[in-house]
Image: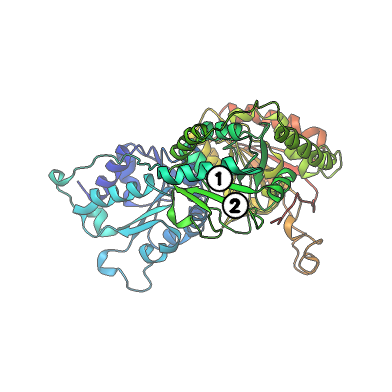
Protein backbone atom coordinates (compact mmCIF):
# COMPACT_ATOMS: atom_id res chain seq x y z
CA UNK A 1 0.00 0.00 0.00
CA UNK A 2 1.02 3.62 -0.48
CA UNK A 3 1.80 5.90 2.44
CA UNK A 4 -1.44 7.83 1.87
CA UNK A 5 -3.44 4.58 1.97
CA UNK A 6 -1.79 3.58 5.25
CA UNK A 7 -2.69 6.93 6.84
CA UNK A 8 -6.27 6.69 5.58
CA UNK A 9 -6.55 3.14 6.96
CA UNK A 10 -5.36 4.33 10.36
CA UNK A 11 -7.82 7.24 10.40
CA UNK A 12 -10.63 4.78 9.75
CA UNK A 13 -9.44 2.48 12.54
CA UNK A 14 -9.26 5.45 14.94
CA UNK A 15 -12.91 6.26 14.31
CA UNK A 16 -12.39 9.35 12.14
CA UNK A 17 -15.61 9.55 10.11
CA UNK A 18 -14.81 12.63 8.04
CA UNK A 19 -11.95 14.97 7.27
CA UNK A 20 -12.15 18.61 6.24
CA UNK A 21 -10.16 19.59 3.16
CA UNK A 22 -9.77 21.74 0.10
CA UNK A 23 -8.92 19.47 -2.83
CA UNK A 24 -6.89 18.23 -4.52
CA UNK A 25 -4.49 16.08 -2.48
CA UNK A 26 -3.27 12.50 -2.52
CA UNK A 27 -4.52 11.97 1.03
CA UNK A 28 -8.02 13.24 0.21
CA UNK A 29 -8.34 10.60 -2.51
CA UNK A 30 -7.04 7.90 -0.19
CA UNK A 31 -9.41 8.71 2.69
CA UNK A 32 -12.39 8.71 0.34
CA UNK A 33 -11.47 5.21 -0.86
CA UNK A 34 -11.07 4.11 2.78
CA UNK A 35 -14.59 5.28 3.66
CA UNK A 36 -13.70 8.52 5.47
CA UNK A 37 -15.88 11.35 4.17
CA UNK A 38 -14.02 14.36 2.76
CA UNK A 39 -15.85 17.64 3.42
CA UNK A 40 -14.75 20.38 1.05
CA UNK A 41 -14.66 23.96 2.35
CA UNK A 42 -14.32 27.35 0.69
CA UNK A 43 -11.40 28.26 2.93
CA UNK A 44 -9.11 26.32 5.21
CA UNK A 45 -9.83 28.26 8.39
CA UNK A 46 -13.51 27.32 8.42
CA UNK A 47 -12.59 23.66 7.88
CA UNK A 48 -10.26 23.75 10.87
CA UNK A 49 -13.02 25.47 12.88
CA UNK A 50 -15.34 22.60 11.93
CA UNK A 51 -12.84 20.04 13.23
CA UNK A 52 -12.56 22.13 16.41
CA UNK A 53 -16.33 22.19 16.97
CA UNK A 54 -16.56 18.45 16.40
CA UNK A 55 -13.88 17.64 18.97
CA UNK A 56 -15.35 20.03 21.55
CA UNK A 57 -18.81 18.54 21.15
CA UNK A 58 -17.59 14.95 21.53
CA UNK A 59 -15.31 15.89 24.43
CA UNK A 60 -12.37 14.57 22.42
CA UNK A 61 -13.85 11.05 22.37
CA UNK A 62 -13.90 11.41 18.60
CA UNK A 63 -11.33 13.61 16.93
CA UNK A 64 -11.96 16.26 14.31
CA UNK A 65 -9.43 16.20 11.48
CA UNK A 66 -8.34 18.47 8.64
CA UNK A 67 -5.89 18.02 5.80
CA UNK A 68 -4.32 20.85 3.81
CA UNK A 69 -2.59 21.13 0.48
CA UNK A 70 1.10 21.94 0.54
CA UNK A 71 2.16 25.58 0.60
CA UNK A 72 -0.93 27.86 0.45
CA UNK A 73 -3.28 25.35 2.09
CA UNK A 74 -0.98 24.80 5.07
CA UNK A 75 -0.39 28.53 5.32
CA UNK A 76 -4.09 29.47 5.22
CA UNK A 77 -5.05 27.15 8.08
CA UNK A 78 -2.81 28.84 10.64
CA UNK A 79 -5.42 31.11 12.27
CA UNK A 80 -7.82 28.26 12.98
CA UNK A 81 -5.08 26.15 14.52
CA UNK A 82 -3.91 29.07 16.67
CA UNK A 83 -7.42 29.49 18.13
CA UNK A 84 -7.76 25.75 18.82
CA UNK A 85 -4.37 25.82 20.56
CA UNK A 86 -5.35 28.85 22.66
CA UNK A 87 -8.54 27.09 23.74
CA UNK A 88 -6.92 23.63 24.24
CA UNK A 89 -8.91 21.68 21.64
CA UNK A 90 -7.66 18.31 20.32
CA UNK A 91 -7.72 18.29 16.52
CA UNK A 92 -5.59 16.32 14.07
CA UNK A 93 -3.94 18.29 11.28
CA UNK A 94 -2.38 16.56 8.29
CA UNK A 95 -0.73 19.09 5.95
CA UNK A 96 0.92 17.99 2.76
CA UNK A 97 4.41 19.34 2.24
CA UNK A 98 7.19 19.42 -0.30
CA UNK A 99 9.13 16.22 -0.84
CA UNK A 100 11.93 15.44 1.59
CA UNK A 101 14.57 16.54 -0.91
CA UNK A 102 13.09 20.07 -0.82
CA UNK A 103 12.60 20.33 2.96
CA UNK A 104 14.16 23.54 4.25
CA UNK A 105 14.60 25.05 0.78
CA UNK A 106 12.97 28.45 0.39
CA UNK A 107 10.26 29.31 -0.49
CA UNK A 108 8.84 25.90 0.45
CA UNK A 109 6.60 26.27 3.53
CA UNK A 110 7.55 24.03 6.44
CA UNK A 111 4.53 23.07 8.62
CA UNK A 112 6.84 21.37 11.11
CA UNK A 113 8.76 24.55 11.76
CA UNK A 114 5.97 27.10 11.31
CA UNK A 115 3.30 25.41 13.48
CA UNK A 116 5.53 24.55 16.43
CA UNK A 117 4.18 27.37 18.61
CA UNK A 118 0.48 26.58 18.05
CA UNK A 119 0.46 22.80 18.44
CA UNK A 120 1.02 20.45 21.35
CA UNK A 121 3.17 18.23 19.13
CA UNK A 122 4.26 18.50 15.50
CA UNK A 123 6.57 16.26 13.52
CA UNK A 124 7.29 15.04 10.02
CA UNK A 125 6.98 11.49 8.74
CA UNK A 126 10.42 10.94 7.28
CA UNK A 127 10.12 7.25 6.26
CA UNK A 128 7.02 5.50 4.95
CA UNK A 129 7.78 2.59 7.29
CA UNK A 130 7.24 4.99 10.21
CA UNK A 131 3.64 5.85 9.27
CA UNK A 132 2.07 3.52 11.91
CA UNK A 133 4.52 4.67 14.60
CA UNK A 134 4.04 8.37 13.93
CA UNK A 135 0.27 8.11 13.71
CA UNK A 136 0.27 6.23 17.02
CA UNK A 137 2.27 9.05 18.57
CA UNK A 138 -0.14 11.62 17.17
CA UNK A 139 -3.23 9.93 18.58
CA UNK A 140 -1.48 9.37 21.92
CA UNK A 141 -0.86 13.11 22.13
CA UNK A 142 -4.50 13.77 21.25
CA UNK A 143 -5.96 11.35 23.80
CA UNK A 144 -3.60 11.67 26.76
CA UNK A 145 -2.97 14.74 28.91
CA UNK A 146 -3.94 18.29 27.99
CA UNK A 147 -6.10 18.45 24.86
CA UNK A 148 -4.49 20.44 22.06
CA UNK A 149 -3.94 20.39 18.29
CA UNK A 150 -1.49 17.82 16.94
CA UNK A 151 0.10 17.95 13.49
CA UNK A 152 1.88 15.47 11.25
CA UNK A 153 3.73 16.93 8.26
CA UNK A 154 3.27 14.65 5.20
CA UNK A 155 5.97 15.06 2.53
CA UNK A 156 4.69 14.34 -0.97
CA UNK A 157 7.11 11.47 -1.56
CA UNK A 158 6.02 9.77 1.69
CA UNK A 159 2.37 9.82 0.56
CA UNK A 160 3.29 8.16 -2.75
CA UNK A 161 5.90 5.74 -1.37
CA UNK A 162 5.12 2.01 -1.13
CA UNK A 163 4.73 0.37 2.27
CA UNK A 164 4.89 -3.41 2.45
CA UNK A 165 1.63 -4.59 3.98
CA UNK A 166 3.63 -7.03 6.09
CA UNK A 167 5.14 -3.98 7.83
CA UNK A 168 1.76 -2.40 8.55
CA UNK A 169 0.62 -3.01 12.12
CA UNK A 170 -1.65 -0.59 13.93
CA UNK A 171 -3.83 -0.82 17.05
CA UNK A 172 -6.01 2.21 17.95
CA UNK A 173 -4.82 4.30 20.88
CA UNK A 174 -6.81 4.15 24.13
CA UNK A 175 -7.18 7.29 26.29
CA UNK A 176 -5.31 7.30 29.60
CA UNK A 177 -6.09 9.36 32.71
CA UNK A 178 -4.29 10.05 35.97
CA UNK A 179 -5.79 10.57 39.43
CA UNK A 180 -4.47 12.99 42.03
CA UNK A 181 -1.88 12.26 44.66
CA UNK A 182 -3.91 11.15 47.76
CA UNK A 183 -1.89 13.45 50.03
CA UNK A 184 -2.62 16.43 47.76
CA UNK A 185 -6.31 15.51 47.65
CA UNK A 186 -6.51 15.31 51.46
CA UNK A 187 -4.82 18.70 51.80
CA UNK A 188 -7.17 20.27 49.25
CA UNK A 189 -10.20 18.81 51.02
CA UNK A 190 -9.08 20.29 54.34
CA UNK A 191 -8.75 23.71 52.73
CA UNK A 192 -12.20 23.47 51.13
CA UNK A 193 -13.82 22.48 54.41
CA UNK A 194 -12.01 25.23 56.31
CA UNK A 195 -13.14 27.96 53.91
CA UNK A 196 -16.03 30.13 55.07
CA UNK A 197 -16.95 31.43 51.59
CA UNK A 198 -15.49 29.17 48.88
CA UNK A 199 -16.16 29.62 45.15
CA UNK A 200 -15.67 26.84 42.59
CA UNK A 201 -14.08 28.04 39.35
CA UNK A 202 -14.78 25.29 36.76
CA UNK A 203 -13.14 25.09 33.35
CA UNK A 204 -13.57 23.05 30.21
CA UNK A 205 -11.59 20.21 31.76
CA UNK A 206 -14.94 19.29 33.34
CA UNK A 207 -16.44 18.91 29.87
CA UNK A 208 -13.55 16.84 28.49
CA UNK A 209 -13.55 14.58 31.56
CA UNK A 210 -17.37 14.38 31.64
CA UNK A 211 -17.17 15.32 35.31
CA UNK A 212 -20.32 17.46 35.50
CA UNK A 213 -22.13 15.10 37.90
CA UNK A 214 -19.20 15.07 40.31
CA UNK A 215 -18.90 18.86 40.08
CA UNK A 216 -22.55 19.35 40.97
CA UNK A 217 -22.30 16.84 43.83
CA UNK A 218 -19.28 18.59 45.34
CA UNK A 219 -20.88 22.04 45.00
CA UNK A 220 -23.98 20.85 46.81
CA UNK A 221 -21.93 19.09 49.47
CA UNK A 222 -19.89 22.24 50.17
CA UNK A 223 -22.73 24.66 49.39
CA UNK A 224 -20.22 26.54 47.23
CA UNK A 225 -21.30 28.84 44.38
CA UNK A 226 -20.00 27.71 40.98
CA UNK A 227 -18.75 29.89 38.15
CA UNK A 228 -17.37 28.53 34.90
CA UNK A 229 -14.81 29.87 32.51
CA UNK A 230 -16.07 30.93 29.10
CA UNK A 231 -14.83 27.68 27.52
CA UNK A 232 -16.22 25.74 30.49
CA UNK A 233 -19.72 27.21 30.13
CA UNK A 234 -22.37 24.44 30.33
CA UNK A 235 -20.20 22.31 32.64
CA UNK A 236 -22.51 23.36 35.49
CA UNK A 237 -26.25 23.94 34.89
CA UNK A 238 -26.87 27.67 35.01
CA UNK A 239 -30.41 27.20 36.31
CA UNK A 240 -28.97 25.49 39.41
CA UNK A 241 -29.43 27.32 42.71
CA UNK A 242 -25.63 27.55 43.17
CA UNK A 243 -24.75 28.73 39.67
CA UNK A 244 -23.35 32.25 39.41
CA UNK A 245 -22.67 32.14 35.66
CA UNK A 246 -19.70 32.26 33.33
CA UNK A 247 -16.67 34.50 33.42
CA UNK A 248 -15.46 35.97 30.14
CA UNK A 249 -14.56 39.36 28.75
CA UNK A 250 -18.04 40.24 30.01
CA UNK A 251 -19.44 38.44 33.03
CA UNK A 252 -22.37 38.29 35.42
CA UNK A 253 -23.16 40.32 38.50
CA UNK A 254 -23.07 37.21 40.71
CA UNK A 255 -19.56 36.26 39.49
CA UNK A 256 -18.25 39.69 40.46
CA UNK A 257 -20.08 39.66 43.81
CA UNK A 258 -18.90 36.23 44.92
CA UNK A 259 -15.32 36.54 43.67
CA UNK A 260 -14.99 39.78 45.63
CA UNK A 261 -16.40 38.25 48.80
CA UNK A 262 -14.94 34.75 48.77
CA UNK A 263 -12.00 33.58 50.87
CA UNK A 264 -11.04 30.59 48.68
CA UNK A 265 -11.19 29.83 44.94
CA UNK A 266 -11.10 26.20 43.83
CA UNK A 267 -10.01 26.06 40.19
CA UNK A 268 -10.90 22.68 38.70
CA UNK A 269 -10.36 21.74 35.05
CA UNK A 270 -9.09 25.25 34.37
CA UNK A 271 -5.65 26.63 33.61
CA UNK A 272 -6.44 29.79 35.66
CA UNK A 273 -4.73 31.80 32.94
CA UNK A 274 -4.79 35.59 33.16
CA UNK A 275 -5.91 37.05 29.83
CA UNK A 276 -8.16 39.51 28.06
CA UNK A 277 -11.08 37.09 27.78
CA UNK A 278 -11.43 35.77 31.30
CA UNK A 279 -12.27 37.01 34.78
CA UNK A 280 -9.34 37.59 37.10
CA UNK A 281 -9.21 36.41 40.70
CA UNK A 282 -8.85 39.26 43.22
CA UNK A 283 -5.85 39.21 45.53
CA UNK A 284 -5.88 37.78 49.02
CA UNK A 285 -7.73 34.56 48.20
CA UNK A 286 -6.58 31.05 49.04
CA UNK A 287 -6.11 29.18 45.75
CA UNK A 288 -6.76 25.45 45.37
CA UNK A 289 -5.90 24.43 41.80
CA UNK A 290 -6.52 21.14 40.01
CA UNK A 291 -5.64 20.55 36.36
CA UNK A 292 -4.28 17.71 34.25
CA UNK A 293 -1.33 19.82 33.06
CA UNK A 294 1.47 20.48 35.54
CA UNK A 295 2.56 23.53 33.52
CA UNK A 296 -0.58 25.39 34.66
CA UNK A 297 0.26 25.13 38.36
CA UNK A 298 1.75 28.40 39.68
CA UNK A 299 1.69 29.85 36.15
CA UNK A 300 -0.32 33.01 36.82
CA UNK A 301 -1.57 32.47 40.38
CA UNK A 302 0.37 30.99 43.25
CA UNK A 303 -1.39 27.79 44.24
CA UNK A 304 -1.69 27.28 47.99
CA UNK A 305 -2.81 23.71 47.29
CA UNK A 306 -2.61 21.79 44.02
CA UNK A 307 -3.83 18.45 42.67
CA UNK A 308 -2.65 17.27 39.24
CA UNK A 309 -5.02 14.88 37.50
CA UNK A 310 -8.12 14.25 35.44
CA UNK A 311 -11.06 16.33 36.67
CA UNK A 312 -13.48 13.42 37.00
CA UNK A 313 -11.03 11.28 38.96
CA UNK A 314 -9.91 14.18 41.18
CA UNK A 315 -13.47 15.25 41.96
CA UNK A 316 -14.34 11.66 42.84
CA UNK A 317 -11.38 11.58 45.22
CA UNK A 318 -12.35 14.93 46.74
CA UNK A 319 -15.93 13.86 47.32
CA UNK A 320 -14.73 10.82 49.23
CA UNK A 321 -12.17 12.81 51.20
CA UNK A 322 -14.53 15.67 52.08
CA UNK A 323 -17.06 13.20 53.41
CA UNK A 324 -14.46 11.29 55.39
CA UNK A 325 -13.23 14.55 56.92
CA UNK A 326 -16.73 15.40 58.14
CA UNK A 327 -18.41 17.27 55.31
CA UNK A 328 -22.20 17.19 55.31
CA UNK A 329 -24.74 18.07 52.69
CA UNK A 330 -27.15 21.00 53.02
CA UNK A 331 -30.46 20.82 51.11
CA UNK A 332 -30.12 22.44 47.71
CA UNK A 333 -33.29 24.51 48.17
CA UNK A 334 -32.27 25.98 51.50
CA UNK A 335 -29.30 27.63 53.07
CA UNK A 336 -27.91 31.10 53.30
CA UNK A 337 -25.68 30.75 50.22
CA UNK A 338 -28.56 29.71 47.99
CA UNK A 339 -30.60 32.69 49.14
CA UNK A 340 -27.67 35.02 48.52
CA UNK A 341 -27.12 33.67 44.99
CA UNK A 342 -30.82 34.13 44.21
CA UNK A 343 -30.90 37.68 45.56
CA UNK A 344 -27.74 38.85 43.78
CA UNK A 345 -28.80 37.25 40.50
CA UNK A 346 -32.26 38.79 40.79
CA UNK A 347 -30.86 42.29 41.33
CA UNK A 348 -28.46 41.92 38.39
CA UNK A 349 -31.15 40.64 36.01
CA UNK A 350 -33.56 43.35 37.10
CA UNK A 351 -31.00 45.93 36.00
CA UNK A 352 -30.66 44.31 32.56
CA UNK A 353 -34.27 43.29 31.93
CA UNK A 354 -35.15 46.52 30.08
CA UNK A 355 -32.55 45.64 27.43
CA UNK A 356 -33.34 41.91 27.40
CA UNK A 357 -37.03 42.61 26.72
CA UNK A 358 -36.65 45.88 24.82
CA UNK A 359 -39.14 46.80 22.08
CA UNK A 360 -36.81 49.36 20.52
CA UNK A 361 -36.14 49.53 16.78
CA UNK A 362 -33.49 48.76 15.55
CA UNK A 363 -33.72 45.63 17.69
CA UNK A 364 -31.56 45.55 20.80
CA UNK A 365 -29.14 42.57 20.53
CA UNK A 366 -29.90 41.63 24.14
CA UNK A 367 -33.53 41.12 23.07
CA UNK A 368 -32.23 38.62 20.49
CA UNK A 369 -30.33 36.71 23.19
CA UNK A 370 -33.39 36.66 25.45
CA UNK A 371 -35.75 35.55 22.67
CA UNK A 372 -33.41 32.77 21.61
CA UNK A 373 -33.18 31.52 25.17
CA UNK A 374 -36.97 31.46 25.49
CA UNK A 375 -37.54 29.85 22.08
CA UNK A 376 -34.88 27.15 21.70
CA UNK A 377 -35.06 23.74 23.37
CA UNK A 378 -31.88 24.36 25.32
CA UNK A 379 -31.29 20.73 26.27
CA UNK A 380 -31.34 19.75 22.60
CA UNK A 381 -29.52 22.76 21.16
CA UNK A 382 -25.80 23.46 20.83
CA UNK A 383 -25.27 27.19 20.51
CA UNK A 384 -22.13 29.24 20.03
CA UNK A 385 -21.34 32.91 19.70
CA UNK A 386 -18.83 34.75 17.59
CA UNK A 387 -16.09 37.05 18.80
CA UNK A 388 -16.66 40.65 19.82
CA UNK A 389 -20.16 41.81 20.70
CA UNK A 390 -22.02 38.49 20.17
CA UNK A 391 -19.70 36.78 22.67
CA UNK A 392 -19.94 39.51 25.29
CA UNK A 393 -23.72 39.85 24.91
CA UNK A 394 -24.48 36.12 24.96
CA UNK A 395 -22.12 34.58 27.49
CA UNK A 396 -23.49 36.36 30.60
CA UNK A 397 -27.19 36.05 29.73
CA UNK A 398 -27.81 32.86 27.74
CA UNK A 399 -28.31 30.19 30.39
CA UNK A 400 -26.78 26.83 29.47
CA UNK A 401 -28.63 24.09 31.35
CA UNK A 402 -27.05 20.87 30.02
CA UNK A 403 -23.44 19.81 29.33
CA UNK A 404 -21.94 20.67 25.94
CA UNK A 405 -24.90 22.76 24.84
CA UNK A 406 -22.95 26.04 24.73
CA UNK A 407 -19.57 26.33 23.01
CA UNK A 408 -17.82 29.26 24.64
CA UNK A 409 -14.50 30.32 23.16
CA UNK A 410 -12.22 33.26 22.72
CA UNK A 411 -8.55 33.66 23.46
CA UNK A 412 -7.12 34.07 19.97
CA UNK A 413 -10.69 35.15 19.05
CA UNK A 414 -10.83 35.43 15.25
CA UNK A 415 -14.00 36.81 13.68
CA UNK A 416 -16.16 34.13 12.06
CA UNK A 417 -14.92 31.25 14.19
CA UNK A 418 -18.37 30.27 15.45
CA UNK A 419 -19.63 29.38 11.98
CA UNK A 420 -17.33 26.37 11.57
CA UNK A 421 -17.84 25.41 15.23
CA UNK A 422 -21.58 25.05 14.62
CA UNK A 423 -20.94 22.87 11.57
CA UNK A 424 -18.68 20.60 13.61
CA UNK A 425 -21.21 20.44 16.44
CA UNK A 426 -23.93 19.38 14.01
CA UNK A 427 -21.73 16.63 12.60
CA UNK A 428 -21.01 15.41 16.13
CA UNK A 429 -24.64 15.57 17.30
CA UNK A 430 -26.87 15.33 14.21
CA UNK A 431 -30.06 15.05 16.29
CA UNK A 432 -29.47 18.40 18.01
CA UNK A 433 -30.04 21.90 16.67
CA UNK A 434 -26.71 23.68 16.08
CA UNK A 435 -26.88 27.50 16.20
CA UNK A 436 -24.21 30.12 15.66
CA UNK A 437 -24.84 33.78 16.49
CA UNK A 438 -22.54 36.13 14.63
CA UNK A 439 -22.22 39.78 13.68
CA UNK A 440 -22.14 41.29 10.22
CA UNK A 441 -18.37 41.77 10.34
CA UNK A 442 -17.92 38.08 11.20
CA UNK A 443 -20.16 37.05 8.31
CA UNK A 444 -17.91 39.08 6.04
CA UNK A 445 -15.00 36.84 7.05
CA UNK A 446 -16.56 33.41 6.51
CA UNK A 447 -20.07 33.85 5.08
CA UNK A 448 -19.41 32.13 1.75
CA UNK A 449 -18.98 28.85 3.59
CA UNK A 450 -22.75 28.98 4.11
CA UNK A 451 -22.68 27.40 0.67
CA UNK A 452 -20.53 24.60 2.12
CA UNK A 453 -23.21 23.86 4.71
CA UNK A 454 -25.78 23.68 1.90
CA UNK A 455 -23.66 21.57 -0.46
CA UNK A 456 -22.49 19.17 2.24
CA UNK A 457 -25.96 18.89 3.86
CA UNK A 458 -24.93 20.22 7.26
CA UNK A 459 -28.15 21.89 8.49
CA UNK A 460 -27.20 24.62 10.95
CA UNK A 461 -29.07 27.77 12.00
CA UNK A 462 -27.10 30.99 11.58
CA UNK A 463 -28.25 34.18 13.29
CA UNK A 464 -26.61 37.32 11.91
CA UNK A 465 -26.98 40.38 14.12
CA UNK A 466 -26.52 43.15 11.59
CA UNK A 467 -25.76 46.48 13.28
CA UNK A 468 -24.00 47.89 10.18
CA UNK A 469 -20.83 48.37 12.17
CA UNK A 470 -18.10 46.83 14.25
CA UNK A 471 -19.86 46.94 17.59
CA UNK A 472 -16.94 46.96 19.99
CA UNK A 473 -15.19 49.63 17.89
CA UNK A 474 -18.12 52.02 17.93
CA UNK A 475 -18.08 55.78 18.42
CA UNK A 476 -18.45 55.55 22.20
CA UNK A 477 -15.03 53.86 22.59
CA UNK A 478 -13.17 54.84 19.41
CA UNK A 479 -14.69 58.07 18.08
CA UNK A 480 -11.82 58.83 15.69
CA UNK A 481 -11.86 55.33 14.19
CA UNK A 482 -15.62 55.41 13.81
CA UNK A 483 -15.54 58.84 12.18
CA UNK A 484 -12.42 58.61 10.04
CA UNK A 485 -12.08 54.91 9.21
CA UNK A 486 -15.67 53.76 8.93
CA UNK A 487 -15.87 51.19 11.72
CA UNK A 488 -19.47 52.27 12.23
CA UNK A 489 -20.39 52.13 8.54
CA UNK A 490 -20.52 48.56 7.28
CA UNK A 491 -23.14 47.65 4.70
CA UNK A 492 -24.75 44.50 3.38
CA UNK A 493 -27.94 42.50 3.08
CA UNK A 494 -26.82 39.11 4.33
CA UNK A 495 -30.19 37.42 3.87
CA UNK A 496 -29.84 38.16 0.15
CA UNK A 497 -26.32 36.71 0.20
CA UNK A 498 -27.70 33.53 1.74
CA UNK A 499 -30.42 33.45 -0.92
CA UNK A 500 -27.83 33.84 -3.69
CA UNK A 501 -25.91 30.91 -2.23
CA UNK A 502 -29.05 28.78 -2.40
CA UNK A 503 -30.08 28.75 1.27
CA UNK A 504 -33.17 29.54 3.31
CA UNK A 505 -33.14 33.08 4.68
CA UNK A 506 -35.20 35.69 6.48
CA UNK A 507 -34.54 39.32 7.37
CA UNK A 508 -36.08 40.63 10.60
CA UNK A 509 -36.45 44.32 11.46
CA UNK A 510 -38.98 44.37 14.31
CA UNK A 511 -38.58 42.71 17.74
CA UNK A 512 -41.95 40.96 17.67
CA UNK A 513 -40.85 39.13 14.50
CA UNK A 514 -37.71 37.53 15.98
CA UNK A 515 -39.36 34.51 17.61
CA UNK A 516 -41.62 33.60 14.63
CA UNK A 517 -38.64 33.85 12.25
CA UNK A 518 -36.49 31.64 14.47
CA UNK A 519 -39.27 29.06 14.71
CA UNK A 520 -39.69 28.95 10.92
CA UNK A 521 -35.93 28.60 10.52
CA UNK A 522 -35.91 25.72 13.02
CA UNK A 523 -38.46 23.90 10.89
CA UNK A 524 -36.28 24.36 7.82
CA UNK A 525 -33.23 23.05 9.67
CA UNK A 526 -35.25 20.07 10.92
CA UNK A 527 -36.00 19.25 7.26
CA UNK A 528 -32.26 19.03 6.58
CA UNK A 529 -31.46 22.47 5.18
CA UNK A 530 -29.25 25.23 6.63
CA UNK A 531 -31.05 28.47 7.45
CA UNK A 532 -29.94 32.05 8.01
CA UNK A 533 -31.89 34.71 9.90
CA UNK A 534 -30.55 38.26 9.59
CA UNK A 535 -31.70 40.53 12.41
CA UNK A 536 -31.25 44.28 12.11
CA UNK A 537 -29.91 45.36 15.50
CA UNK A 538 -28.70 48.50 17.20
CA UNK A 539 -25.07 49.32 17.90
CA UNK A 540 -25.48 48.53 21.61
CA UNK A 541 -22.61 50.01 23.68
CA UNK A 542 -23.43 48.47 27.10
CA UNK A 543 -21.91 45.22 28.41
CA UNK A 544 -22.18 43.46 31.75
CA UNK A 545 -18.98 43.95 33.75
CA UNK A 546 -16.79 43.87 30.64
CA UNK A 547 -13.12 43.86 31.55
CA UNK A 548 -13.81 43.31 35.24
CA UNK A 549 -10.95 41.77 37.20
Report the residue at 76% width, 38% height from top.
Answer: 345
Residue 122, position in %: x, y?
A: 36, 58
Q: Is residue 413 left or right of residue 294?
A: right
Q: Position of residue 318 (x, y in %)?
A: 49, 37
User: In the image shown, does 215 or 449 lie closer to the viewer?
Assistant: 215
Q: Can you name the residue that lies furthest to the left here?
A: 166
Task: Decide if residue 68 is in sight here.
Answer: yes
Of residues 461 and 113, the one nearer the viewer is: 113
Could you tell me if the residues under marks 1 and 2 are in contact, i.e. CB atoms within 8 Å? yes
> Which residue occupies 28% across, 39% down?
172
Question: Alpha-carbon neighbours of circle 2 within 10 Å: few (<14), some, or many (≥20)?
Answer: some
Residue appearing at x 68%, y 49% in the figure: 259
The residue carrying mark 2 is: 286
Displayed quadrant of residue 471: bottom right
Local SS, label 1: helix
- Quarter placement of the C terminus: bottom right
- Return the residue nearer the eye: 462 or 378: 378
Local crowd size for mark 1, using a 10 Å CA cut-off: few (<14), some (14–19), many (≥20): many
| Mark with earlier residue (1, 2) | 1
Q: Is residue 485 positioned above or below 229 on the image?
A: below
Residue nearer the viewer, 52 or 215:
215
Q: Residue furthest bottom?
A: 106
Q: Is residue 3 left or right of residue 270?
A: left
Residue 531 position, x and y percent, is 63, 36
- Element class at badge 2: strand
Locate residue 371: give its quadrant: top right
Residue at 35% x, 47% y is 28
Asked whether the viewer can see residue 59, the reply is no
| Residue at the spot of label 1 | 191
Amino acid sequence: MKGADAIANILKREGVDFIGCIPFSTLTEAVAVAGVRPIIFRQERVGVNMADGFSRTTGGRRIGAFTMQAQAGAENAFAGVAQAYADSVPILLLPAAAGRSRTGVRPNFSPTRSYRDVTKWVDQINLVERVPEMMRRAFSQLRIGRPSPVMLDLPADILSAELDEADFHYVPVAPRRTAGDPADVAEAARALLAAKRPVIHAGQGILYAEAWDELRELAELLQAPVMTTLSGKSAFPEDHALSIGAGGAATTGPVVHFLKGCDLVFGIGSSLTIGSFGVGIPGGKTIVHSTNDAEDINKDYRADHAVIGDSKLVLGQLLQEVRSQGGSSVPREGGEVVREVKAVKGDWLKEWMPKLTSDEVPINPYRVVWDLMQTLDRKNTIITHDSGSPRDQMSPFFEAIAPRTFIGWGKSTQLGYGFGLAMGAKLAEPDKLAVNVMGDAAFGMVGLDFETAIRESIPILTIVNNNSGMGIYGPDRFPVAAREYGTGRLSGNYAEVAAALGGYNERVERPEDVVPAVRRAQQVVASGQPALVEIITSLEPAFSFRGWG
